[in-house]
Amino acid sequence: MKLEDWRQAGEEFDFGGHPIFYRDEGDGPALLCIHGFPTASWDWHRIWPQLTSRFRVVAADMLGFGFSAKPQLHRYDILEQANLQEALLERLGIESADVLAHDYGVSVAQEMLARRDPAQAENGAKTRLRSVCFLNGGLFPEAHRPRLVQELLHSRLGPLISKLASESAFQRGFSRVFGPKTKPNRQELRDFWTLIEHGEGHQLLHKLLRYIDDRKAHRDRWVDALRHAKIPLKLINGPEDPVSGLHMSEIFRKRIRGAEVVLLQGIGHYPQVEAPEQVVEHYLSFVEAGSTPG
């Protein structure tokens, strides 16, 4: 599917006065897919047909990403993005859902898990979560290894770096987090940049990187949500990822007892793009074995 076709097949809903783009397709148990930084729900397009043949799949471009609103004078944070996901599920009348989350989205999923932990729940989240499967992401902030450009964007130079962002620089840096033999092609890189640049989004990159601070501030709450989870958890990890690859999977395996870990050899930070067939195979085996539709 072409990027423009993806956009045309989507819908919008209002979240706090901001239009939010989302896709809602398929029949069966609901599956919420939560994308990463700096891209959008388009990240799921290579596994979308396989997932929508088995599930009702919902995926939004979070605030500041993709085809959703990108207010310039806004304080972006993970808790608000979790509110967005909760609002969308409620709007669609979804009472229970599985979750598949990647990168930035793993923190959103951890916050959603924490809201359902009886020991620390702070609000009445309405949708029951049946399972959560994570792809590469900073589940433990102490193990996250940001790229140089992320460190610069997160520094005082952030606003300047955002203004200087260009497609060629993005393509060079973005390709480095992929596996050695699974680099994105020219059209894929162009599509990813189109999503970032849409609505002057490249000017917000330093603001979206606030998630680094959020992960540190909520570290104990979010890690406890993993440790205390009463639902099945799984990590599908591309070990070639320099940001959250093998080292992150090893920590997850040691600290989250009973959770399944799968390593996709030769794959980097974007397993759903680099190895879509493997991701679908391992994901389906997970939900079929441990998640009860309802």
Image (cartoon, helix red, strand yellow):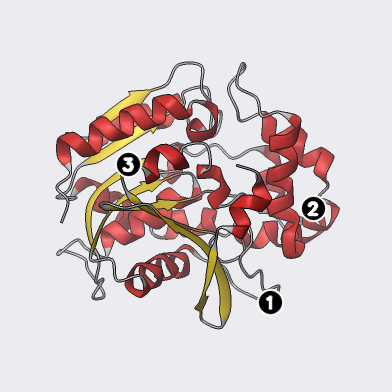
Q: Secondary structure at mark 1?
A: loop
Counting from the top left corner in percent of width and height, residue 293 is at 17, 51
Asked if labels 3 and 2 touch by Cβ distance under 8 angstroms, the answer is no
Picture layout, residue 2 above or below residue 4: above
Provide residue 150's location: percent of width, then percent of height.
Answer: 66, 46
Label 2 element class: helix
Label 3 secondary element: strand
Confirm or deny contact between disc 3 and disc 1 (CB under 8 A). Answer: no
Of badges 3 and 1, the one in the foreground is 3
Residue 58 picture quarter: bottom left
Q: Position of residue 101 (x, y in %)?
A: 41, 47
Marks 2/3: CA–CA distance:
33 Å
Q: Can the viewer see residue 257?
A: no
Q: Quadrant of the C terminus?
A: bottom left
User: Could you say which quadrant of the image residue 191 lies in?
Assistant: top right
In this figure, which residue is indicated by the disc labeled 3?
Answer: 133
Q: Which residue is mark 2?
A: 161
Please provide percent x and percent y for residue 288: 19, 36
- Residue hosting label 1: 73
Image quadrant occupied by the N terminus: top right
Rendered residue at 85%/52% (across/down) = 164
How far apart are the alpha carbons under marks 3 and 1?
A: 33 Å
Disc 2 or 3, which lies upstream in sequence? 3
Question: Which kind of residue does numbered mark 3 sit on?
Answer: Cys
How far apart marks 2 and 1 lie (CA) works out to 17 Å
Q: Three-letter amino acid code at disc 1? A: Leu
